Image (spheres, grey):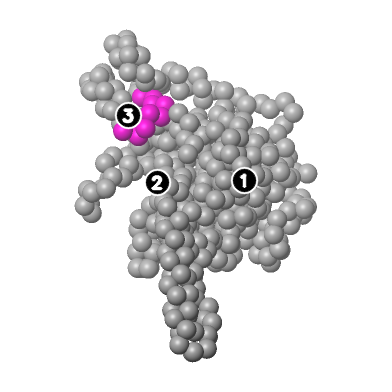
C-alpha cells in the first residue's frame, strides 16, 4: 500500500556539519553492545516484538512497537487495540508503505484461525497495509487460511534464519528495547503529568499516531510550538518531545516528496496555504470572502457618492479586506517545501532519514552507544547530516528554539561514516572504525 496523499545560521544549529567533531583516540572496546544494568526484564511477548522489529529495521524500515489504534470514542474507550509492530518502508522514489505485524509467543495452534481472521479485519480497518502473523509455529491449515486472506506468516524457524543474516545489528537500540531510550521516555511521562498545558493527545500523536495521519503532522507541530512558547520543558521532556517532533516532521516531508513527481512546487505550497488558512484544500471560503469584500467596497462607494451629492467632502478610509486577513499563510511553508524538494532530489539518503533521526535522538542523545556500530554506518554520512540540518532549521520555525536547544547535542554525533566495503553482516556487532 502506498500512502500518498538553508536559511540563516542559528547558534544552536551550528552543529559543525562541515566537519566532524574531533574525537580523542580510544582503546579498542569489546565488540558486544554495552548492556545497561538498569534494563528492565522483558516478557516473552515483548522479546518477540523486539526481535521482529529489529529484523524490519535491519532491512530498512522505520519501526514502532506497541502502537495504539485510536478511534473517535469517549475517554477511556478510544484505543481499539495495539499494533505489536508497525514498520514503515520507503522506496527509492520516497513512496511510503506500511506493515502491521501481530506477534504471538504462545505455543500450540489454539486460536490460530481466529487470529488470522482478526488480523485480516484489522488490516482492512487500517486501510489495507501489509499484514504478518508471527507465531512460534504455523500449521498447514494456518498457512492455507493466511494465503486465502492475503496475510503473510512467519514462524520461529524463519525468524532465526533472518536473524542469522543480520548478526552485526545490535540486539536492542532506541525504541527497540534500548534501555536508555526507555528510561528517557519513562522519565518524560512522569514529568509530563505535571505539565497540564501539554495535552496527552498531542504527545500520543507524535509518538505513534503520526504514522497513520501524515497530513495532520504540520498542524500538530504548529500547535506544539504555540503550546510550549510559554511553557519551559524540563529535561528530558524537551529532548524526547523534540526527537519525536523531528521524526514526525521528516515523515510529513517524505510523504509530500512523492507528490512532486506529478504536481508542481507551487501546487504543494497552495495546498498547504489553503489547509492552514481555511482548513481544507477544497474549501471555497476565500472566494466567498473575496465576493464579500467586493460587495462591501461597492456599498462604501455608494455611501461616499451620496454624501458627495449633498456637498459633503469625501474622506477616504482604508477598509481591511477579509480575504487578505484569512489568507495569510504561515511564513514557514516555503522552507518546508524546500526541505521536501531536498529529500526528493536525494532519495537514496532521504529514505534513510527516519532511521537516522531515530538513532541520533533516541540512542545517541539519550546516552546509548548502539548507533556507533558498523551496521548503522550507512545512516551517518555527510549527506544525512545535511538533510538533518535542514529538518532542524524547519523544526525551529514551526515550534521555536526550545526543542532545538535540547537537540543541540547532535553536534557531537559523528556524521563522517560510510558503509564498509565488504560488510560482515553475519558477524557479531562491532563499533564503527574511527576516522
Q: Measured from the top left, where is residue 366 in percent x and y?
A: 54, 54
Instruction: Examine the rendering and report whether any part of residue 51 can be seen.
Output: no
Measured Cα–Cα span from mark 3 to mark 1: 33 Å
Identify the element where label 1 is drawn. Answer: helix
Residue 342 to residue 195: above or below? above
- Is tag 1's residue or tag 2's residue first in the polypeptide sequence? 2
Q: Secondary structure at mark 3?
A: helix
49 lies left or right of 110: right
**Is 130 part of what is drawn in magenta?**
yes
Any mark on residue 209, and which? 2
Task: Return the residue nearer the eye: 21 or 72.
Answer: 72
Comparing labels 1 and 2, the label whose residue is closer to the camera: 1
Q: Give whichever of discs 3 and 1 has the lower sequence position.
A: 3
Residue 160: where, in percent of width, then height?
47, 22
82 relative position to 51: left or right = left
Element assignment for label 2: helix
How far, Cα to Cα, is label 2 from label 3?
Answer: 17 Å
Q: Which residue is mark 3?
A: 124
**Residue holding disc 1:** 265
Give the quarter of the figure containing the N terminus: top left
At label 2, counting other C-alpha atoms closer than 10 Å, the crowd grade (few under 14, some 14-19, many 20 or more) is: many
Q: Position of residue 161 (x, y in %)?
A: 50, 19
Q: Are marks 1 and 2 in contact (CB under 8 Å)?
A: no
The picture places residue 209, in percent across and down from the top left corner, at 40, 46
Query: Can residue 336 be spotted in the picture?
Result: yes
Range drawn in magenta = 125-134
Asked if residue 128 is positioned above or below residue 234 in the image, the reply reads above
Closer to us: 361 or 278: 278
Which residue occupies 41% across, 29% down?
129
Was residue 413 drawn as part of the magenta stretch in this picture?
no
Amino acid at each position: 500500500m502506498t500512502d500518498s496523499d538553508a536559511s540563516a545560521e542559528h547558534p544552536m544549529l551550528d552543529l559543525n556539519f562541515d566537519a566532524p567533531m574531533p574525537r580523542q583516540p580510544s582503546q579498542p572496546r569489546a565488540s558486544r553492545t554495552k548492556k545497561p544494568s538498569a534494563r528492565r526484564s522483558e516478557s516473552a511477548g515483548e522479546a518477540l516484538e523486539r526481535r521482529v522489529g529489529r529484523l524490519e529495521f535491519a532491512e530498512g524500515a522505520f519501526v514502532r512497537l506497541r502502537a495504539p489504534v485510536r478511534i473517535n470514542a469517549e475517554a477511556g474507550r478510544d484505543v481499539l487495540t495495539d499494533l505489536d509492530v508497525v514498520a514503515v518502508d520507503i522506496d527509492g522514489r520516497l513512496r511510503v508503505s506500511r506493515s502491521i505485524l501481530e506477534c504471538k509467543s504462545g505455543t500450540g495452534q489454539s486460536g490460530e484461525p481466529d487470529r488470522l481472521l482478526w488480523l485480516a479485519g484489522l488490516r482492512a480497518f487500517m486501510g489495507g497495509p501489509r499484514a504478518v502473523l508471527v507465531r512460534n509455529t504455523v500449521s498447514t491449515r494456518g498457512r492455507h487460511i493466511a494465503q486465502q486472506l492475503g496475510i503473510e506468516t512467519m514462524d520461529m524457524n524463519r525468524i532465526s534464519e533472518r536473524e542469522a543474516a543480520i548478526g552485526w545489528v545490535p540486539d536492542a537500540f532506541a525504541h527497540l528495547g534500548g534501555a536508555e531510550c526507555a528510561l528517557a521516555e519513562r522519565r518524560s511521562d512522569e514529568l509530563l503529568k505535571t505539565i497540564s498545558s501539554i495535552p496527552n493527545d498531542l504527545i500520543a500523536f507524535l509518538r505513534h499516531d503520526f504514522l497513520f495521519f501524515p497530513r495532520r503532522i504540520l498542524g500538530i507541530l504548529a500547535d506544539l510550538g504555540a503550546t510550549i512558547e510559554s511553557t519551559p520543558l524540563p529535561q528530558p521532556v524537551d529532548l524526547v518531545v523534540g526527537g519525536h517532533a523531528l521524526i514526525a516532521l521528516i515523515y510529513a516531508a517524505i510523504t509530500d516528496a512523492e507528490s512532486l513527481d506529478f504536481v508542481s512546487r507551487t501546487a504543494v505550497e497552495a495546498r498547504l496555504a489553503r489547509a492552514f488558512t481555511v482548513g481544507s484544500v477544497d474549501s471555497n471560503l476565500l472566494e466567498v470572502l473575496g465576493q464579500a469584500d467586493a460587495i462591501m467596497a461597492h456599498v462604501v462607494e455608494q455611501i461616499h457618492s451620496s454624501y458627495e451629492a449633498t456637498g459633503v467632502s469625501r474622506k477616504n478610509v482604508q477598509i481591511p479586506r477579509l480575504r487578505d486577513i484569512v489568507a495569510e499563510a504561515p511564513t514557514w511553508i516555503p522552507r518546508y517545501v524546500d526541505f521536501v524538494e531536498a529529500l526528493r532530489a536525494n532519495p537514496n539518503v532521504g529514505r534513510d532519514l527516519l532511521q537516522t533521526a531515530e538513532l541520533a535522538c533516541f540512542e545517541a542523545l539519550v546516552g546509548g552507544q548502539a548507533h556507533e556500530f558498523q551496521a548503522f554506518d550507512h545512516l551517518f554520512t555527510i549527506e544525512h547530516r545535511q538533510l538533518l540540518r535542514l529538518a532542524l532549521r524547519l523544526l525551529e520555525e514551526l515550534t521555536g528554539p526550545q526543542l532545538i536547544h535540547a537537540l543541540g547535542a547532535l553536534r557531537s554525533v559523528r556524521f563522517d561514516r560510510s558503509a564498509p566495503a565488504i560488510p560482515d553482516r553475519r558477524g557479531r556487532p562491532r563499533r564503527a572504525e574511527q576516522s
